[in-house]
Image (spheres, rainbow, N blue to C red):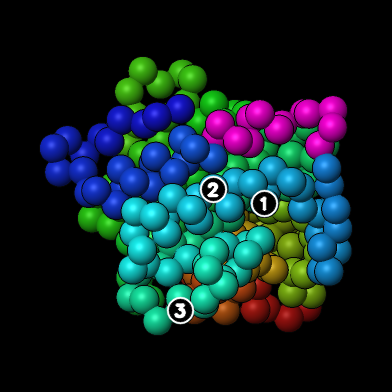
């Protein structure tokens, strides 16, 4: 899927480039999805990686290094290392790539997985693109330009806005799994809110940006899992922080903004 900019003639060249990277990733991932000869191995952290994860990241790195040689890259599979073996960490601009977020789903043939692409300048994440081709959907945002999505039902890109829900008792919550949550916090959220479902991974947070879910949380993440989500959620009017309310680097709590302090309180409360 190649997304229309939705920003008119002012579309930033970096966003256009990121969308093109997503097109490239989609071609590779869909070629390998549900392939009978998919090669899967286990990484040292006991998470799976496929030859497709690696192929996507290699290809995107090659394009970035060719067209933006002064930018650095951080990816899930190859870290900050460039093709020439150098670690280009001093650059002001950094592309952050997760070739397949939801690899376990990808391996099992579940269509909920995506390529995540972000561009950061210093500590500010300027843009994010999330492409989920098996769902036929893509989300994107650039700072100051709003957040957008397009799927099979959308003739044109749709501008995203978070929900207006203000009371926990009316809130819908999504998460990936119960592992790693502060003791008792998931139960507290379950008891305090209207509905809880495990949509999982990137999708939980983007459903908040779409206004379909009001709170989403994942307690154990890496920067490449989070970076692309930040501008999409914030440009849709939501908030995304760590589980302690700081910058989301190793965990992510996403809300419509109205419920953020209440949700943080649920995470920090003691039984």
Give the quadrant of the C terminus: bottom right
Distance from Cα at disc 2 to Cα at disc 1: 9 Å
Which region is colored magenta?
Answer: 26-38
Considering only vertical position in the picture, is 176 above or below 219?
A: above
Give the secondary structure at mark 3.
loop
Question: According to the image, label 2 marks what residue?
Answer: 59
Residue name at image x 49 percent, y 62 percent: 96
Question: According to the image, label 3 marks what residue?
Answer: 89
Front one among 224 and 152: 224
User: On the rendered structure, is 159 left or right of 183?
Assistant: left
Give the secondary structure at mark 2.
helix
Residue name at image x 81 percent, y 37 percent: 38
Q: Earlier in the sequence, mark 2 or mark 3?
A: 2
Residue 172 in the image, given as x and y percentages of width and height: 60, 46
Q: Is residue 228 magenta?
A: no
Residue name at image x 46 percent, y 35 percent: 23
Considering only vertical position in the picture, is 136 above or below 252?
A: above
Question: According to the image, label 1 marks what residue?
Answer: 54
User: On the rendered structure, is 206 left or right of 149?
Assistant: right
Q: Is residue 28 magenta?
A: yes
Considering only vertical position in the picture, is 189 above or below 232?
A: below
Q: Earlier in the sequence, mark 2 or mark 1?
A: 1
Farthest front residue in view? 84
Front: mark 2 or 3: 2
Q: Residues within 10 Å of mark 2 (few under 14, many from 20)?
A: some
Distance from Cα at disc 1 to Cα at disc 3: 21 Å
Give the quadrant of the N terminus: top left
């Amino acid at each position: 899927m190649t997304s229309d900019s939705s920003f008119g003639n002012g579309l930033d060249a970096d966003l256009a480039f990121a969308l093109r990277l997503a097109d490239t990733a989609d071609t590779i991932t869909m070629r390998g999805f549900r392939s009978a000869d998919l090669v899967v191995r286990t990484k040292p952290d006991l998470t799976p990686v496929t030859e497709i994860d690696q192929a996507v990241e290699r290809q995107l790195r090659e394009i970035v290094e060719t067209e933006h040689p002064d930018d650095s890259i951080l990816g899930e599979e190859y870290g900050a290392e460039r093709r020439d073996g150098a670690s280009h960490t001093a650059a002001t601009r950094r592309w952050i790539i997760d070739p397949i977020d939801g690899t376990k789903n990808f391996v099992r043939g579940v269509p909920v997985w995506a390529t995540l692409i972000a561009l950061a300048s210093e500590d500010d994440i300027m843009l994010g693109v999330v492409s989920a081709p098996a769902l036929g959907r893509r989300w994107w945002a650039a700072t100051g330009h709003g957040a957008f999505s397009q799927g099979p039902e959308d003739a044109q890109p749709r501008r995203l806005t978070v929900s207006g829900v203000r009371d926990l008792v009316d809130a819908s919550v999504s998460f990936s799994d119960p592992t790693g949550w502060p003791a008792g916090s998931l139960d507290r959220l379950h008891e305090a809110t209207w509905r809880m479902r495990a949509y999982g991974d990137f999708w939980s947070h983007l459903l908040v940006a779409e206004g379909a879910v009001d709170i989403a949380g994942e307690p154990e993440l890496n920067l490449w899992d989070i970076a692309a989500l930040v501008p999409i959620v914030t440009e849709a009017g939501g908030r995304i922080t760590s589980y302690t309310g700081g910058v989301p680097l190793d965990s992510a709590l996403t809300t419509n903004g109205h419920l953020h302090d209440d949700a943080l309180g649920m995470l920090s409360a003691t039984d």
